[in-house]
Amino acid sequence: MQRQPIKFSKKQRGVALITALAIVSLASLAAVAMAHHMQLSIRRTTNILTTDQGFLYTLGSEAWSRGMLIRDLQDNELKTYDGLDEDWAQELPPTPVEGGEVQALTTDLQARFNLNNLYLQNESTAEEKQQFALQLALFKRLLALLELDESIAQATADWLDQDVNLQFPDGAEDNEYLNTEQPYRTGNSPMGNPSEIRLVKGVSAEAYETLAPYITALPESTPININTASPQLLQALVNTLDEQAAEQLKDEREENPFKNKKSFVDRLKDLLDENKVKSQDIDPLISVTSRFYQLETTVSMEFISQQLHSLLYKGDKDVVTLSRSIGTF
Ligand SMILES: [Ca+2]
Ligand SMILES: [Ca+2]
């Protein structure tokens, strides 16, 4: 039996055409969406790979910096002092690498005032109290030189000490901070990062910006390295040293870094009235070598820029990384 061809009416043919067009346009939309999705996936993967590549470059930079410091540690001549003329202190200018460029700078954190030097345990010896008084006076002088409120020094000491009793008339403990708009309590322990001082009474955003280049927060008490400290810190160390003399010392050490503390004190006695140089007050605050360094690495790739800060510790036999942070603090 022969089949009769199905006959569609004109109306039915119109519906079929519209349906076909709708399917084609839906398929086109799906194809566009898929292509867009694929493009995003490719971009996302590229970003992940580039970020990984950048991070590996920052680790490479850290290994390079460690190598410099290890060499400094092993070379008997370089071991006697740490100064800005040494290899570790030289900046790595923007250097091309596959896919971008790397730049790095190692700085001596003992060129700065260590806020944790103001940490005084409850049961401290008379000698520890004496050391604390010298550190407090030094920080006050630094604040005064930077035209900041000296009371920040006492408030910082209260912030660090273990109790919540006011140690000084200008200090501040829980009572002060619990009465603020957003209440918080004192740290009552050494700081993990110098930016913590922003929480201390009297430290505004402007004050912190001024203070930041001169301070650090290290895991142990540290002296200031007179070979790397800024002229402002040299002035804070020796209260009779004026700006001109501090600049002069900075220029002189470029040629002849101080190999020991005595040569620094002797030079001070030449520059200043000998009777005004109290070596017993200066000696405990200073050093000519350093153990804590910061490496700042910037990696710039096509789409991404990364910054890594590494805290490096130079021990007696090796250099180790204590912490890393990604970002600009
Ligand atoms: Ca050295
Ligand atoms: Ca306290």
Image (spheres, grey):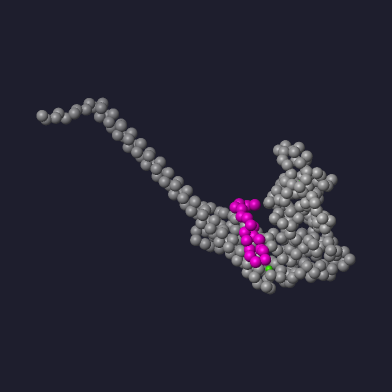
Say whether residue 231 is left or right of residue 101: right
Q: Is residue 237 at all visible to an observer of this figure?
A: yes
Chief secondary structure of the magenta span? strand
Q: Residue furthest bottom?
A: 77
Position of the N terminus, as image quadrant, is: top left
Quarter of the image for residue 178 reads top right
* x, y percent for residue 108: 68, 61
Say whether residue 74 is left or right of residue 141: left
Magenta stretch: residue 273 in it? Answer: no
Question: Against 310, is 162 above or below?
Answer: above
* x, y percent for residue 27: 34, 38
Q: Please report the bounds of the magenta region as a residue range.
A: 311-329
Q: Residue furthest right?
A: 275
> Residue visible at 82% across and 55% down?
125
Closer to us: 113 or 204: 113
> Residue visible at 82% across and 47% down?
167
Magenta stretch: residue 319 in it? Answer: yes
* x, y percent for residue 247: 77, 64
> Residue visible at 84% across and 70% down?
270
Closer to us: 147 or 174: 174
